[in-house]
């Protein structure tokens, strides 16, 4: 049984994506329609989702002092492609990234 707490807030989505593959047996929940639907990923988005997942995994491994399992697109390169802007709430002045 895993005693770790779930990732907080919006990081739960990242945690869910990162954990869609089991390296020990190669099982990948993104191979199934149900697994993709849980994350809102369409079949057409599958390649990009897998690329992001592996880049996230490599970044997490690096933070723990481990090398990646294989060569991946650097996470910074993937994030630089994302069409995001900073949205500022008129009411409270809070800022958030938005597509």
Image: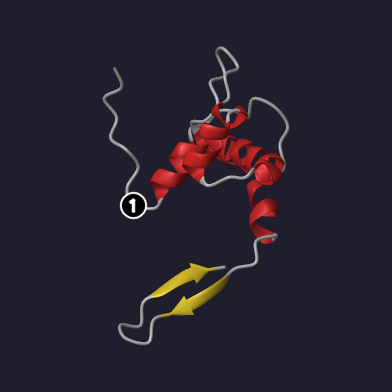
Residue 22: percent from left, percent from top: 53, 20
- Residue 65: x percent and y percent? 52, 31
Judge by depth and name the residue closer to the eye, 97 or 39: 39
Residue at the location (31% across, 22% down)? Answer: 2
The image quadrant that residue 32 belongs to is top right
Is residue 61 in view? no
Q: Which residue is mark 1?
A: 9
Provide the secondary structure element on which disc 1 rests.
loop
Residue at screen point 64% across, 25% down: 69
Q: Is residue 19 left or right of residue 49?
A: left
Instruction: Report the colour scheme.
Output: secondary structure
Q: Quadrant of the C terminus?
A: bottom right
Horizontally, residue 74 falls left or right of residue 23, namely: right
Q: Is residue 11 left or right of residue 1?
A: right
Q: Is residue 17 above or below residue 86?
A: above
- Residue 11's spot in the image, x, y percent? 41, 48
Q: Position of residue 70 (x, y in %)?
A: 70, 27
Seen in the picture, residue 50 relative to 90 is either above or below; the reply is above
Mark 1 crowdedness (10 Å alpha carbons): few <14, some 14-19, many ≥20: few
In the image, farthest residue toward the top: 25
Camera-side residue of 72 and 12: 12
Q: Is residue 62 left or right of residue 45?
A: left
Quadrant where the image shows the N terminus:
top left
Q: Residue at x 51, y 35 (%)?
A: 18
Residue 2 visible to an observer of this rendering: yes
**Residue farthest front in this picture:** 33
Please tell me how many numbered marks the rendered image carries. 1
In this rendering, is residue 67 above or below 60? above
């Amino acid at each position: 049984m895993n005693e770790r707490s779930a990732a907080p807030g919006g990081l739960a989505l990242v945690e869910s994506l990162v954990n869609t593959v089991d390296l020990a047996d190669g099982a990948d929940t993104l191979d199934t329609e149900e697994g993709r639907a849980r994350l809102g990923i369409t079949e057409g988005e599958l390649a990009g989702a897998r690329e992001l997942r592996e880049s996230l995994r490599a970044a997490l491994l690096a933070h723990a002092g481990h090398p990646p399992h294989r060569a991946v697109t650097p996470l910074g390169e993937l994030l630089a492609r994302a069409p995001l802007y900073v949205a500022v709430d008129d009411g409270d002045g809070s800022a958030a990234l938005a597509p």
